[in-house]
Structures are given as C-alpha cells and as structure tokens.
Image (cartoon, rainbow, N blue to C red):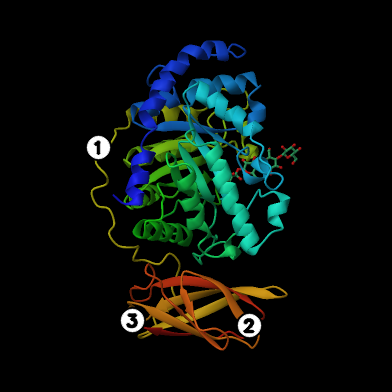
Amino acid sequence: MSNDSVRDAGRRRPAVPRLALASAAVGVLTAAAAAFTFTGSASAGTTLGASAAEKGRYFGTAVAANKLSDNTYVTILNREFNSVTAENEMKWDATEPTQGQFNFSNADRIVSHAQARGMKIRGHALAWHSQQPGWAQNMSGSALRQAMVNHVRQVATYYRGKIDSWDVVNEAFADGSGGGRRDSNLQRTGNDWIEVAFQTARAADPGAKLCYNDYNTDNWTHAKTQAVYNMVRDFKSRGIPIDCVGLQSHFNSGSPYPSNYRTTLQNFAALGVDVQITELDIEGSGTTQANTYRSVVNDCLAVARCNGITVWGIRDSDSWRASGTPLLFDGSGNKKPAYDATLSALNSGTTPTNPPTNPPTNPPTNPPTNPPTNPPGGCSATVSVNSWNTGFTASVRVTAGGSGTNGWTVSLTLPGGTSVVNTWNAQASGSGGTVRFSNVNYNGRLSAGQSTEFGFQGSGSGSGLSPTCSAS
Ligand code: G3I
C-alpha cells in the first residue's frame, strides 16, 4: 500500500463517529444553549441542514465568533446549519499574529460551538496571500517558505481530528485570461509552495480532507477555472495529496452564476476529488435570487461528489457584501424567498448513486479566450512582463500552430545581469544568455490553436524579451 493509500485510509475515519457524536450532542445541547432561544433538533426536511443530510450532504455557513452572543444569529445557526466555517478566525493573521506565537481563542469558540452540536467544521484557510500577519507580509524567500510550512503544520496539528475539510491553499490563481498563478510573496517562494502546503497539512492531520479553494472558478470556460483544473489533475497524477476543490461561488452581476456551473462541478469531481461550494452568496432579491439559489442547489445535487454547500453568512446584514442582500435570511432573521427555494430544491433533489456517466477524459479542448489566429505549424510565444526596481515576473503564452504540439520549448535571450529565480508551469534550463523553457507533463499537448501559459520570475531587467517557440 502506498503512503497515499495509507493516508487515504486514515482520512476516512470521521463520518460515523461524528454522526454518533452529533446525536449525543443534541442531548447536551439544551443545557449548553440555554442562553439562547434554541428551537430543538431539526426535523428531516424542514431545515437546510437536515434536508441536506438526507441527501448525504452538509449545509453550512460562515460564522463570526463575535456574533455567537447574538441571540437571533445563534438561533438560526443552531436550527438550520450542520457545518460551519470560521469567517476570519482561522486565518494566518488571527492564529499567528506574532511569529511562533499562536492564538486560537476566537477560532476555538467557533469550534466548541460546532462540536457541541455535532456540526462539521471547515477550516479556512491555512495558506493565503491575503490576511497575513504583518511579520509574514514582510518576509520572502526561504524564510517565508519556512514560516508558511510551520504555520500550516502548527495549525493543522492543533486542530487535528476536528476539521472535516481544510482550505489548505486559498486563491492562488490570477484572474483574467492568463490562466496563471497569482503573484504573491508565497508564489515568489517557488511554484511548488502549494504542493508543499498540501503535503505538510496531510502529515499534520491525515484525517482532514484537503481542499484547494478559489473564486471565479465557477465558469468552465474561464482561464482561471482551467488553470485550477489543470493543477488538480497534475496533483492527482503525481500523488500530491488533495481531496477536494472549493468553489467559493460569490455571484453578482459582474460575476454571474454561469449556465455551465454543473459542468464545472462534474469535471472537477471526475478528477477524483470532492467538490464543495464553500462561500455561496448571490446578490439580488426576490424570485430572481431565489431561482439562482435553486439552480446552484440542483447542480450540486446532480453531482455525487458535490458533498456540501456553505453560504457566506447567515443574515444579509452579516454578509461581507451586505448591500447586495446576498444571503438566505434578511437583516431581521426572516427567511427570504431564496431560503424557501433552497430548502425546496434540497428536498426535491435526488441523490445520484453513480458518478457522472461521461467524465471528461481529456483536458478542455477549447481555449477560454480568443486564441491568436493559428500559426501554420510549430508554435508561437508572446511574453508580458511586470517589472519592479530589481526584478520582474514574465508570463509567456504559448500557442500551438496548425498541427498542434506534443511538447514545446520556448527560448529567451536574457539581458546581461538578468537571471531566472523561479519558474512555474515549465521547466527551465540554461542560465544567463539564452534560457530554454520546456513544457511540463500537463501542458505539452496542445491542439491546433490552443494556448497555455507559463511564467517565471527574474532578477535584473526584463526588458526586450523576445521569445521563440519550437514544437515537438
Ligand atoms: O474586526 C475588525 C474591527 O475590529 C475593525 O473595527 C474593523 C475596521 O475595518 O475591521 C474588522 O475586521 C474586518 C474583518 O473582516 C471582520 O469584520 C476586516 O477589516 C476585514 O478586512 C475583514 O474582511 C473579511 C475579508 O475576508 C478579508 O479578506 C471578511 O469579513 C470575510 O468575509 C472575507 O472572506 C473572504 C474569504 O476569506 C475568502 N474568499 C473571499 C471572502 C470574501 O472576501
């Protein structure tokens, strides 16, 4: 048995004991919740959590520790939800405000609340470019890498056995048509920072599902969705531990619910990971909003491995986008039409017993953005550079010619004094003078006209780069 199989076997432990704990916890709950107007345990099908549980799923919400003393808030939380995510309390700035000194007090309040009621807990988030403590923001290179690894290890170890799913890495891909990684201090420590975070988390808590979580990854045709898909496929093929993909699913007029959402869920699931809708909110009101919530729930129920939905807050007034009234309860805690639609979709949905019948076996064939007109054969490359005083990052887009490619190599002559510091989505060889970047195992095969993107960070000047591409 491989190490991964051993870890997988270990990871499957929680479901039954937690359910047992859930029923036991209901007994102690009355006393524990005496300060609140607790309405008792949920009847099947009459609350979001109970209805989702009937379909083998959870229905969760983001929780803020400082609202656990709000009576209306806690009443709804306890009645409707069977999973929680700490909205901010498990983030790096909250848990390690000073390097090496950990503070779990607010996160623990949420964990205790959930555990006492048998709710699942989603951990959010171990490694992220945002909400880093000041000391980490000021770090770089191997010191930052070490600090990140230590953070992941310490936090995942502290909560070992309590977390159903961890967002190990959050929001590491760039928006827009490039389909590459987001530039960040963590990314600049080397392209392997994500897999190192996952390996560290697995070692620290082998029982937790390990998720990659991001936003704007809902539309199957978007470059960012494709980029995350390619990373997950690569991780699965190389045995990097990953168990789930989180689609945040913050929908609004600028980033609407896409009609191919179900396709996205299916395609991720077909890679052999769970899919979780992790931060759902849908701006709007009335029937339109309700219909979109219904569609999201129906899509999740249609995909066997879509195993849970979390809304990003309880009442509209709790939302990070309160003015968009994106949640299921109004500011007074009343159920909105969106609530009714969600519950009725959960109740009427069926649970597929089999995975989707036609999982995609190949990567998407259509590039998400308009590709350049096909070069006749071989391949072509273009570069865009983002410079600062002493260095730069370069994104290189490789486009296959009319015959497609099995592999490609891009050559670049660097100005004197310039060198490559790290590379992602390609293998670099040569230093100084001409550097060659060759495809890695997941992006060498391009059909005619298809594009892929790789990048590198350089020290020195990135001016005047002129890539040439050769295909094999
Ligand atoms: O608690 C302080 C308060 O003491 C202070 O007076 C106030 C002044 O601004 O700030 C309060 O902290 C705010 C915190 O939310 C709690 O409300 C922070 O400024 C604010 O930045 C923070 O925003 C959070 C945001 O992440 C930060 O990136 C939101 O609550 C939280 O909902 C949001 O969640 C993210 C997910 O983690 C990742 N995906 C996107 C999602 C929405 O942005």
What whole-number distance in Å separates the C-alpha atoms at marks 2 and 3? 34 Å
Please state the horizontal and vertical placement of residue 80, each as a whole percent of the image.
Answer: 48, 23
Quadrant location of the C terminus in the rendered image: bottom left
Along the horizontal axis of the image, is 174 left or right of 104?
A: left
Q: In this view, does 277 lie to the left or right of 420?
A: left
Horizontal arrangement in the rendering, residue 358 relative to residue 73 (left or right): left
Q: Mark 1 points at which residue?
A: 353
Residue 453 at least partly seen: yes
Q: Distance between the residues labelled 1 and 3?
A: 42 Å
Q: Is residue 126 visible?
A: no
Asked if the residues shown at circle 2 and circle 3 are in contact, with their CB atoms under 8 angstroms apart, the answer is no
* Nearer to us in this view, 346 or 191: 191
In the image, which is nearer the foreground, mark 2 or mark 3?
Answer: 2
Q: How many marks?
A: 3
Residue marked by disc 3: 402
Quarter of image, res 408: bottom left
Mark 2 lies on a secondary structure that is: loop
CA neighbours of label 1 inside 10 A, class few (<14), some (14 to 19), many (20+): few
Please identify the quarter of the rendering in which residue 401 is found.
Answer: bottom left
User: From what the image shows, is residue 227 above or below residue 281?
Assistant: below
Local crowd size for mark 2, using a 10 Å CA cut-off: few (<14), some (14–19), many (≥20): many
Q: Is mark 1 on a helix, strand or loop?
A: loop
Circle 2/circle 1 CB separation < 8 Å: no
Q: For mark 2, what is the residue?
A: 418
